[in-house]
Image: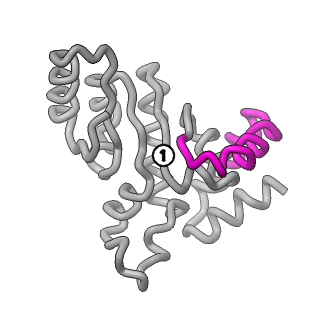
Amino acid sequence: MAPMVATPAEAADFRERARAAGLPVAGVMVEVPSAALQAAEVLAEVDFVSLGTNDLAQYTMATDRLRGSLDDLLDPWQPAVLALVARTAAAGRAAGRPVGVCGESAADPVMALVLAGLGVTSLSMAPSAVPAVRFALRAHTHVHVEEIARAATAAPDAARARAAATALVA
């Protein structure tokens, strides 16, 4: 899997290099807005994508992770970040290709419900987070996680997105 792919051409180049090296499956990370905005074209070139929501939030919100005063902008609940995740997941569904999420957002049980509702097909997290996320996912139907995702993506800011999703979980 190649990190920081920004264009479909980069995805195609990586796929060709991976195939030349004998790898039958090649995927890329969606960590920059350009890759999410062109997710359909990127997915036409590779077998899967994985969203790195920490980097995606950083680059979408034009802020540095090391700037503590801007932590609120790095929140994966930001509507713009959720919109990019939704767009990428929709492209994955249309292409019949897996779309994963890795990082801290996948380990948040409520966010995991939103991600599943948006169409994300796999979540990668620290082993310690698996039981809580598994419990949350098993406790809700697909129809309900779609409802939770709609509520989160309709919110005007990160705090209200989290609150809307959490209200439907309880």
From the viewer's side, name the closer residue of 75 and 39.
Answer: 75
Q: Which residue is mark 1?
A: 102
**Mark 1 neighbour density, 10 Å: few (under 14) some (14–19) many (20 or more):** some
- Which residues lie in the magenta part? 124-150
Is 147 within the magenta?
A: yes
* Quarter assignment of residue 7: top left
Image location of residue 23, percent across then percent down: 27, 17
Residue 104 in view, yes or no: yes
Element at label 1: strand
Name the residue located 15 percent from the left edge and 16 percent from the top edge. Answer: 20
Image location of residue 56, percent across then percent down: 37, 55
What residue type is disc 1 on?
A: Cys
Image location of residue 52, percent across then percent down: 41, 49
Name the residue located 76 percent from the left edge and 45 percent from the top edge. Answer: 136
Name the residue located 42 percent from the left edge and 58 percent from the top edge. Answer: 54
Image location of residue 170, percent across then percent down: 85, 57
Is 108 within the magenta?
A: no
